[in-house]
Image (cartoon, grey):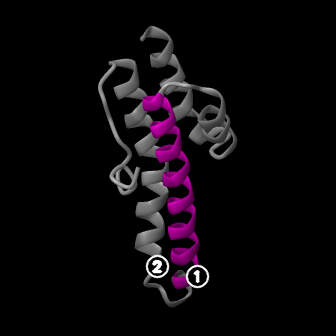
Amino acid sequence: MEDNKWIKVILHASAFFAPFLVPILFMLLIQDDRVKSLSIQALLFQVVMYVLMAISGVLSFILIGIPFLIVFGIMTVVVPIIGIVNAISEKDWQYPIVGRWV
């Protein structure tokens, strides 16, 4: 269980240095079902956030997307930090928006 704790921390922290590569590698290489589910959630969360930020960026030309761009940008930074804190304290946690999809 202790090993999975640090694997989960690395998985959440990967949002800052390799948001797509690390979740895909963990999904393929780690055999624990909880880590696989969390890696799929992390990958889906990053994809959804980048898509939402791109749509908000396009809509910012008509000024309606700027608040959404700010909120999604903050979420992209804050949500992985919450995941890191929960992984260190060994609490079961799911990503918002995509947690129920997996």
Q: Position of residue 46 (x, y in %)?
A: 54, 53
Determine if the magenta segment contains residue 54. yes
Q: Amino acid at mark 2?
A: Gly
Q: How many marks?
A: 2
Determine if the magenta segment contains residue 28. no
Within-10-Å neighbours for mark 1: few <14, some 14–19, many 20+ = some
Name the magenta segment's main secondary structure: helix
Label drawn at residue 101: none
Which stretch appears magenta?
33-59
Instruction: Identify residue for label 2.
Output: 65
- Can you say whether 52 is above or below 16 in the image? below
Q: Residue at x 32, y 35 (%)?
A: 93
The N terminus lies in quadrant: top left
Q: Position of residue 36 (x, y in %)?
A: 51, 35
Q: Residue at x 41, y 44 (%)?
A: 79
Q: Position of residue 94 (x, y in %)?
A: 35, 41
Label drawn at residue 58: 1
Q: Residue at x 34, y 27 (%)?
A: 86
Q: Position of residue 16 (x, y in %)?
A: 60, 40
Q: Residue furthest left?
A: 91
Give the SS element for disc 1: helix
Q: CA distance from mark 1 to mark 2?
A: 7 Å
Discs 1, 2 touching: Cβ within 8 Å: yes
Displayed quadrant of residue 31:
top right
